[in-house]
Amino acid sequence: MHKIILSLALCCGLLFTNSCSKDKKTTTTGGGGTSWNWTGTEPFSVKLDGVSYTVSAADISIFDILGYYNINADLTDDLSIALSLQSGVAVGEYTTPSPNNFTHTNLITGYQGSALNSGGKIKIIQNTATTIEGKFYGTVSSPLSQETHVIAEGYFKITK
């Protein structure tokens, strides 16, 4: 149930904050010394503050809500990462804030941060009728506090 609520909140927040902005497509190779050279583990893997997580398909949900794919991955019972991607997002590299974004939530502390204002990077490798695949990294921050978390070597290959 919390996945659906988080997805709706993320989608509504993105629509509100980005309704007038154009999609920012980058031509860099990831910035910060990153050249997108990690492989990742299907269906979802990521490093959160230096700790590696591999997420099984059973702990991932994908919803198509109002033209956005909301991909929720439960790293543990308390930690999650969510991506919000335009349903028709093209292969390429994107810098947040754009209509495409990712967030991190900690249910124990109540923390919820996003890459909206911190220049996160998302690379879409494929977006077909059955599969969406990509990589992502960046720093997530909370608008309510100064707390930040580093997301590195994010990878997803999700069956729609």
Image: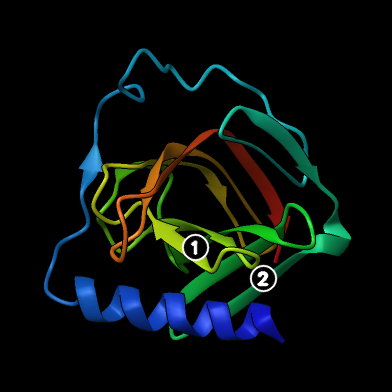
Are discs 1 and 2 less than 8 Å apart at CB? no
Quadrant of the rendering where the C terminus is positioned: bottom right
Quadrant of the rendering where the N terminus is positioned: bottom right
Residue where numbered disc 1 is placed: 111
Q: How many marks?
A: 2
Q: Looking at the image, which residue is at 29% across and 79% down? A: 15
| Above or below for 51 versus 45 | above
Label annotation for residue 128: none
Residue where numbered disc 2 is placed: 62
Q: The disc labelled 1 sits on which kind of residue?
A: Tyr
- Across and down, in percent, residue 28 comes to 27, 25
Q: Quadrant of residue 92?
A: top left
- Across and down, in percent, residue 69 comes to 53, 70
Q: Looking at the image, which residue is at 19% across and 77% down? A: 19
In this view of the protein, which residue sits in the foreground, 101 or 118?
118
What's the CA distance linking mark 1 and mark 2? Answer: 22 Å
